[in-house]
Image (cartoon, rainbow, N blue to C red):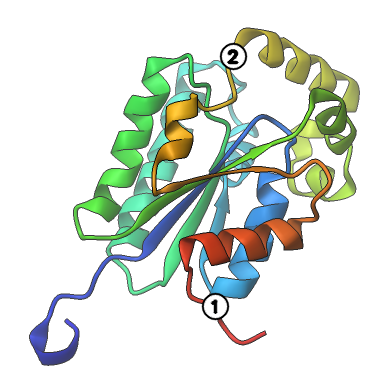
Amino acid sequence: MGEAGAPVRAPDLLLIVGPPAVGKMSVGREIALRTGYRLFHNHMSIEPVLQFFDYGHPSFGRLVEGFRRSVFEEVAQSDLPGLIFTFVWAFNLPSEADALEERTRPFRSRGGRVRFLELQAPLEERLRRNEHELRLAEKPSKRDVARSRDVLLQHEAQYEFKAPNEFTQRDDWLRVDNTTLSPEEVAVAAIKHFDLPETQQ
């Protein structure tokens, strides 16, 4: 409870979306450093499960989604300032929007603010970033860079990773072309645009 018994609002939720290897995790780390929000990049749930089940196995999907759901529910009920979640949103799959609705519900139901930061960069640049040292360090499943590149190209042909234009008109949405911007520059822009709280640096 807050002052005079007022209920405490839920933590904020910032969802960073965009195609593979666009820099979501790197930007998320910078925003977390500046706001005190906790970063939950999607491979934090994927990599442990890959020790037991491969992509596409029913158990893989259940374990990954179950862990994500639990983290979202627990953080939404906590006194943490906010959560940053990074993921690839395939806009041509209706099931993606359904899953997102489930993830955001614990925050929205408590009055938490939900915002979306969309990153975009050309395929050539993302192929280069796909072999970045930080990406390979944090995501062991990407260390077979030839296979990772092939999967990235397959998904590029199969899915739509750019949000429909109407999304960009929403108050809760910010699209940034980060082709030539550093993660620090994108973080500063997002914090300013969404008026996120900043901690002392």
Q: Tell which circle, 2 or 1, labels the residue nearer the N-terminal end.
A: 2
Q: Which residue is mark 2?
A: 159
Numbered disc 1: secondary structure: loop
Q: Does residue 140 sit above or below 138 in this rendering?
A: above
Query: Which image quadrant: the N terminus?
Result: bottom left
Which picture quadrant has residue 4? bottom left
The answer to whether any part of residue 144 appears in the image is no
Q: Is residue 97 visible?
A: yes
Q: Residue furthest front?
A: 169
Q: Quadrant of the C terminus?
A: bottom right
Query: Residue lying farthest bottom?
Result: 4
Which picture quadrant has residue 29? Answer: bottom right
Is the C-beta separation of discs 2 and 1 under 8 Å?
no
Which residue has dot 1 on it?
A: 198
Residue 103 appears left or right of 151: left
Residue at x-position 52% and y-position 27%: 163
- Residue type of the residue flagged with mark 2: Tyr
Residue 153: percent from left, percent from top: 77, 14
Query: In the image, is 106 to the left or to the right of 53?
Result: left
